Image (cartoon, rainbow, N blue to C red):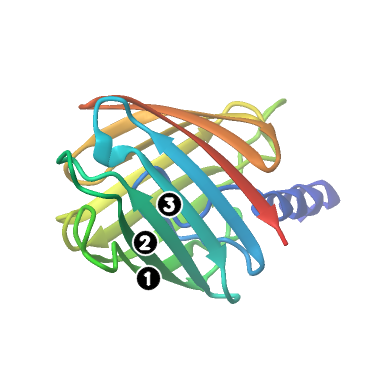
Amino acid sequence: MTPVRHLALAVCLLAAVAVRADRLLFIPTGKKLPQGTVRGEWLFDGGDRERNRFYLGAGITKNIEFEFLTFSPPRSGQSRLDSMNVSYNYVDPVVGFVPGITLGVRDLFDRSEGRAFFVATTYKIGLDGLYNSDTPAELTLGLGTKPYRGAFVGVTLPFTATFRIIGEHDSRDLRAGFEFKPHRDLAFRWFHQEQGGTWSLSWTRRL
């Protein structure tokens, strides 16, 4: 491996600290938040109140991540409901070499889409190009119980270090959109699904 490829690999691994982990849009991935890192995200969908939710995740140990979520139920008159996602990262992804593998449970309290057990694998694919050579593409493949109903898949394709196309299919719905990162800790996302457009704003911080 040349010194340039060594440097590119180091940049990719360092950049992974700042990106979202464990969840693409709604599907899990083969990554996690690093230990000592927290992420808050507000997701808003004007057409579906249950999609209006707040996530707060943290890398508790080197391998374990907890993510708390609170959301508005679809029926009026109900108060907000809470649940939790828990994942165990068996191995971290290394660009072009080793895929990341994560096992876990989504909606632990069975109050959102339904409690689901899953295993997810994420491949980081190094790209050659003038603008995105230090930002890998990602392919996620996984299996899960309800609501995934079997297999799910997700992709991210960077155009630059600050802008990338994102998409996923959870065996029920297809979603596609983009992510813009004006700051390494701040990310704005917009994506479209059958119910309409949804956007989110997230902040990630290493403590």
Indicate the position of residue 24 as horizontal and vertical percent values: 42, 46
Q: Earlier in the sequence, mark 2 or mark 3?
A: 3
Where on the picture, by quarter, is residue 128?
top right
Distance (Cα) linking label 1 and label 2: 7 Å
- Could you say which is closer to the camera, residue 128 or residue 99? 99
Asked if disc 1 and disc 2 are in contact, CB closer than 8 Å, the reply is yes
Residue occupying the far right of the picture: 3
Tell me which numbered mark, 1 or 2, is placed earlier along the sequence: 1
Q: Residues within 10 Å of mark 1 (few under 14, many from 20)?
A: many
The residue where tag 1 is placed is 103
Q: Residue 23 has which mark?
A: 3
- For marks 1 and 3 on the same chain, the one whose residue lies earlier in the sequence: 3
State the image coordinates of residue 13 (x, y, percent, origin top left): 69, 55
For residue 145, side relative to residue 7 (left or right): left
> Across the whole image, how many numbered discs are drawn on residues?
3
Which of these two is toward me, 57 or 159?
Answer: 57
Residue depicted at 73% across the width and 54% down the height:
14
Q: Which kind of residue does numbered mark 3 sit on?
A: Arg
Mark 2–mark 3 contact, CB under 8 Å? Answer: no
- Position of residue 145 relative to residue 50, above or below, is below
